[in-house]
Image (cartoon, rainbow, N blue to C red):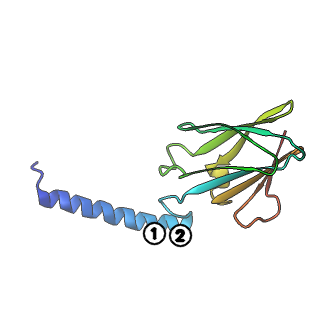
């Protein structure tokens, strides 16, 4: 079979039409096919002069280790995985202060996609409290 410019152009047109239609269907059902940037904000609300150590990573990215003072904020952003069926985006973070250390899943695509595009977390002595874009009351608490 000979590949010509016309056949390549036809195939690209069909592919683009398919993606356009698929995106419209998915948008109505689950949100955009091409995910928006998601922001995660972690605020140290431990009190006093307590410093929070945070190390976040995903399967693909290691964001490094940071120390944030009381009242300070750490943030990162990313685009959730385009190919939802292959692997969902997950960022887990090791949080520690004093003698406490625990790993928290601060973003799980399956759990958080419909909950927030800007995901806020307050780190307090009793646990980590999650809020959505609108700052509604605590939606999720992860305990130490």
To which quarter of the image does residue 120 belong?
Answer: bottom right
Percent across and percent down for residue 10 are 20, 62
Percent across and percent down for residue 90 are 61, 43
Q: Is residue 15 above or below residue 46?
A: below
Pick the quarter of the image with the C terminus. top right
Residue for point 47% across, 67% down: 25
- Give me the disc on residue 44: none
Label 2 element class: helix
Label 1 element class: helix
Q: Nearer the viewer, residue 38 or 52?
A: 52
Residue for point 13% across, 61% down: 6
- Dot 1: few (<14), some (14–19), or many (≥20) neighbours within 10 Å? some
Q: Count all numbered tags in the image, as a single digit.
A: 2
Percent across and percent down for residue 139 are 79, 58
Between the C-alphas of marks 1 and 2, the distance is: 6 Å
Question: Disc 1, disc 2: CB below 8 Å?
Answer: yes
The residue wearing badge 1 is 24
Residue for point 59% across, 56% down: 38
Q: Is residue 68 above or below residue 137?
A: above
To which quarter of the image does residue 131 belong?
Answer: bottom right
Percent across and percent down for residue 37 are 55, 57
Q: Is residue 18 left or right of residue 93?
A: left
Q: Nearer the viewer, residue 127 or 17?
A: 127
Q: Is residue 90 above or below residue 8?
A: above
Q: Nearer the viewer, residue 70 or 121?
A: 70
Residue for point 81% across, 40% down: 51
Q: Is residue 92 left or right of residue 29?
A: right
Q: Is residue 31 left or right of residue 126?
A: left
Residue farthest along the top direction in this orientation:
99
- Dot 2: few (<14), some (14–19), or many (≥20) neighbours within 10 Å? few
The residue wearing badge 2 is 28
Q: Nearer the viewer, residue 93 or 18?
A: 93
């Amino acid at each position: 079979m000979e590949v010509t410019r016309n056949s390549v152009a036809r195939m690209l047109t069909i592919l683009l039409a398919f993606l356009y239609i698929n995106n419209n269907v998915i948008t109505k059902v689950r949100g955009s096919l091409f995910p928006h940037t998601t922001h995660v904000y972690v605020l140290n609300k431990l009190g006093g002069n307590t410093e929070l150590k945070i190390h976040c990573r995903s399967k693909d990215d290691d964001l490094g280790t940071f120390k944030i003072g009381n009242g300070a904020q750490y943030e990162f952003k990313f685009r959730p995985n385009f190919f939802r069926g292959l692997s969902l985006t997950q960022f887990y973070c090791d949080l520690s202060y004093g003698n406490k250390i625990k790993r928290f899943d601060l973003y799980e695509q399956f759990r958080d996609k419909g909950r927030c595009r800007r995901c806020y977390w307050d780190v307090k002595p009793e646990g980590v409290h999650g809020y959505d874009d609108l700052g509604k009351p605590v939606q999720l608490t992860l305990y130490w």
